[in-house]
Image (tube, coloured by chain):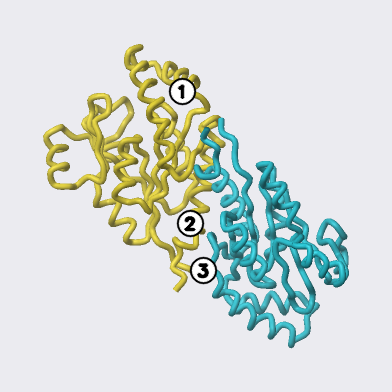
Chain colours: A yellow, B cyan
Amino acid sequence: MFTRKGILFVISGPSGVGKGTVRSTLMPLVEDIHVSVSATTRPPREGEIDGQDYFFTDPARFQQMIDNDELLEWALVYGNLYGTPKEYVTTMLSQGNDVLLEIDIQGALQVKEKMPEGVFIFIAPPTIEELSRRLCGRGNDSEQSIQIRLAACQEEMAHMKYYDYIVVNDRIEDAVEKVRSIITAERCKRKNLNLG
Amino acid sequence: MFTRKGILFVISGPSGVGKGTVRSTLMPLVEDIHVSVSATTRPPREGEIDGQDYFFTDPARFQQMIDNDELLEWALVYGNLYGTPKEYVTTMLSQGNDVLLEIDIQGALQVKEKMPEGVFIFIAPPTIEELSRRLCGRGNDSEQSIQIRLAACQEEMAHMKYYDYIVVNDRIEDAVEKVRSIITAERCKRKNLNLG
């Protein structure tokens, strides 16, 4: 009955909160949503595929993307550069398609400045202590790296106030169901429909 | 991790659109929501239970409720008076509980004036023609009554612009799932959480 405007969904939260798992579990459950692939100078982890998980790039090319204003947001995170190519997102949205970004908090706040009409979802840990346990459990970070991340996390939690939705990632199935519901609800919002 | 403010959900739409079926199908699927029971001077239909479907009352008592400002909204619909007792709703919300109202469009607009922070959901027919077919199919209305309702429906559709969400009731299961998602999403909204 109605056509719709394209909606930008931004999933974000502290490092280690499980936002990547939320995104990958969510994707098969949602129809008609397009994931933006980030560019990064970080080396691929085992199993990661170029152009699917990330566009793996070198610092010189990344600098060029910044200079040419090709990035919607970019950030230096733990010594590596991450960024979201702008053209894919704006093209999809202008064609009435929904786009999902999964990015860190610094990046999300940059996107919010440029695209305040986006839907900003903060994935929160049940407690700071639980986040600590998860980071230790990951097993590929040094003790010092974990301490730096925890301090950053406490600061990052203060940024919740800029988000539209807060989803506590207690059980992954519940968190995914909540994000799925947020997407369904936003698609029913009157302001996102072309009432003609 | 967070406590929440009570949220008022208002399900509304044209007569015959199926909002009563949406509400009754939805209720067993949603935890912790309280349905407000309306007062009416309309005689009970077969199977309807006093105090559960409606508070069936006479015009004199209804007038008293209006005079005492006991109603959140009231309306004269097809010769009968309908109204929402105020105290139940405000008490529930102040205790942090969610309340669901299923009311006609005139009533919803009155509630929106008094409680603009409510979540207003418009149940829309797939088309005006489909609404006509449904009203005819109901089998307990005269031809003239159907014509009056259809004309009212076209006017009522113009009120969609006052609602937060539009849910097209094409398949009842889909409409219920969308309203369920809206409730879940609103419960995750940052502005409805006490971030402390």
Measuring 12% from the left and 43% from the top, which residue is drawn there?
Answer: A67
Q: Residues within 10 Å of mark 1 (few under 14, many from 20)?
A: many
Q: Is residue A83 left or right of residue B63?
A: left
- Chain bearing tag 3 is B
Tell me the quadrant of the picture where the N terminus of chain B can be found: top right
Q: Quadrant of residue B160?
A: bottom right
Q: Which residue is mark 3?
A: B161
Q: Which residue is mark 1?
A: A131
- Where residue A25 sits in the image (x, y, percent)? 47, 38
Disc 3 or disc 1, which is closer to the eye?
Answer: 3
The residue under label 3 is which amino acid type? Lys
- Chain bearing tag 2 is A
Residue lying furthest top: A143
- Where residue B79 sits in the image (x, y, percent)? 78, 79
Q: Which mark is residue A187?
A: 2
- Chain bearing tag 1 is A
- Where residue B139 sits in the image (x, y, percent)? 78, 77
Measuring 61% from the left and 51% from the top, which residue is drawn there?
Answer: B180
- Total labels drawn: 3
Task: Give the CA separation, mark 3 to mark 2.
Answer: 16 Å
Measuring 54% from the left and 40% from the top, which residue is drawn there?
Answer: B193
- Where residue A58 sits in the image (x, y, percent)? 16, 32
What element does badge 2 sit on? helix
Q: Quadrant of residue B23?
A: bottom right
Q: Quadrant of residue B62?
A: bottom right
Instruction: In this rendered view, identify the residue nearer to me: A178 or B3.
Output: B3
Residue lying furthest front: B68
What element does badge 1 sit on? helix
Q: Above or below — where is B131 with respect to B86?
A: below
